[in-house]
Amino acid sequence: MSTLTTTRRKPWTPGRVFFWLTLVVLTVIFVAPLLWMVSTSFKTNEDATALPLSWLPRPFTTDAYKTVLTASSATPVLRWFLNSLLVAVANSVLVVTVDALAAYALARLRFRGQKFAFGTVVATLFVPPFVFLIPNFLIVSKLGWLDSLWALIIPSAGGAFGVFFLRQFFSSLPVDLEEAALIEGANQWQIFTRIVLPLARPALATLTVLSFLTNWNDFLWPVYVLFSAEHQTLPAGLSTLQSSATTNYPLAMAGAVVASVPVLILFVAAQRHVIQSVTHSGLKG
Amino acid sequence: MTVQAPPVRPESRSDAGVPGKPRTIPRHGRLTPYLFLAPFAVLFIGFVLVPAIFGLWVSLHDYNYLLPGQPWVGLQNYLDLFTPGSRDSGDFWHSMLATGIFTVLSVPFLIVCPLGVALLLNRAFRGRSFFRAVFFAPYVLGVSVVGLLFRFLLDPNIGLVNSYLGHAIPWTTDVPWAWISLVAMTVWWTLGFNAIIYLAGLQEISPELYEAAEVDGASRWDQFRNVTLPGLRPVVAFVTTVTLLASANMFGQAFLVTKGAPANETRTAIMYIASTGLGSNRQGMAAAMSYILAIILIGISALNLRLSRRREAS
């Protein structure tokens, strides 16, 4: 990415000392809260609230995890975890599938009303999302999806971002291969599945990761459309851990760790795609 | 406007490489595009287009989805919101004020701090991508984890922050502390997102410009003022717009950390809309509020866009 390179040994100029000092202080600010979360999740409730606070659990216990991961628990974090996973996977598969199909039509096929269709899709990107909150709640209730995971899987797949993103990517692909395939007698479905989709793999991966993260972290919507404890996703469920009068913080932090680990792993594994999706939204959006 | 291709187009090889030829393949059945579009179209119409119109319809009713009838009230919901002393106007505009305060306090930090981090990360040093990942990591966690974590860190009695400060500062229950908490946690959470956008912008600036400035004897600060900032101007405009909208949409932080406290000082507009429409089931009124907020936000973004265009032109 960068053309800059470091030489083996550089002298410790005041500028360099200042630079590394700033970097280290910032890193501590960014990492310390996460370490505190992990440390607290291995504490007993008495230890977590006893002053002076300690960075190391005394004693070290995995009770909080045992409690939240027990199926019969009043806070079934494991169940929430599986709900979140199901919802995020199903939603991102749905998003990528329907968006790729539509984006291909908008980028490569010709039909009446094409410009109007694309214009409408783009225009909705400028409408603030909360406008859809109340009417979608009513629509979901009419469909009988309140307190059901369908409410989290289906409606957000109507969003226009993925279609716009993939349409721009498909349009940037060279058209020659597709034309050659056409002359060979391939139909549009074959061209789409055998030529365009393989070429678009990076963009499809980026959209998948982005949809997964967005859905996994979605907060407001599940808080209001899911009611029963066993139907919550992690974000909605976690907020109930804290709303009780006396919060058991080791329990809450164990839940937070369980919610963080998958996305942090996904982030590290797919860092390039995550960073790229942000950069795309920034420079090309 | 629309270029309509005849169903069967005579094959012509001659136009294969003609520049300016539309990058579309005209050979397909008339129905094919609609079949490709259909699955998305169903979702897009059902959960984006219909709701946008249906919401307006709802806002013209005294709507409560649990009741059998939804009486038509015309513009009454909107009029009520603009009538001082009506049931909702005080609370609604107070929540709009809270959103405004949060936006005004948070946006400057969310524009400047990530720029500083991006400048640090734009230098050549070992472990650059590691540090980039560290600063970006909180963003992938989501507001529920971040909210829960900061509620704990900022707890007046057993929070880590007060234990280091040695004072029982009411971070979550009194102003101005609550505002500081909300802004600080939002910076911690989303700094990485803006920093990545800045970083991409910084790497688009041609190194030759810096070399030329150095030849002219420009100091680091001069280079920043005369090369970096002008080069980043479009990126800064973009970051400002996105951040303004994100801050105006603030919900989770206040919902989890301050719960709107003290009194309703930090209850944001989105919190009030959600609790009116989904908590108290007064969907008509909540829909009216969301349209008012949407119009204000679209107006502010348009104004911001025009201002940054004018600055670019001058």
Image (cartoon, coloured by chain):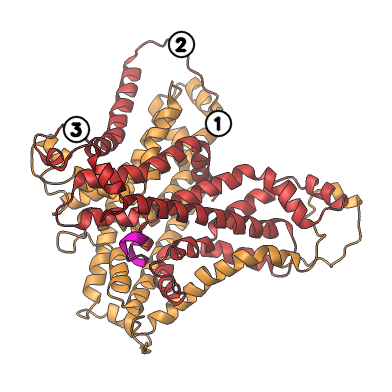
Chain colours: A red, B orange
Report the residue marked by disc 3: A57
Q: Quarter of the image holding residue B244?
A: bottom left
Give the camera-side residue of B221 and A278.
A278
Main SS category, magenta section = helix
Report the residue marked by disc 1: B206
**What amino acid type should be assigned to the residue bearing mark 3?**
Pro
Q: Which is closer to the viewer, label 3 or label 1?
A: 3
| Pointer 3 chain | A
- Distance between the Cα atoms at labels 2 and 3? 40 Å
| Mark 1 and mark 2 on one chain | no
Residue B24 shows in the view: no
**What amino acid type should be assigned to the residue bearing mark 2?**
Arg
10 Å neighbourhood of mark 3: few (<14), some, or many (≥20)? Answer: some
Magenta stretch holds residue A268: no
Where is residue B265? Give x, y as percent: 19, 61
| Pointer 1 chain | B
Q: Is residue B164 left or right of residue A12?
A: left
- Distance between the Cα atoms at labels 3 and 1? 51 Å
Q: Give, as a single range, the part of the protein colored magenta.
A: A223-231
Q: Is residue A7 left or right of residue B272?
A: right
User: In the displayed structure, would residue B271 be above or below residue A75?
Assistant: below
Residue at horizontal 87%, vertical 65%?
B8
| Pointer 2 chain | A
Report the residue marked by disc 2: A8
User: In the displayed structure, would residue A67 be above or below residue A110?
Assistant: above
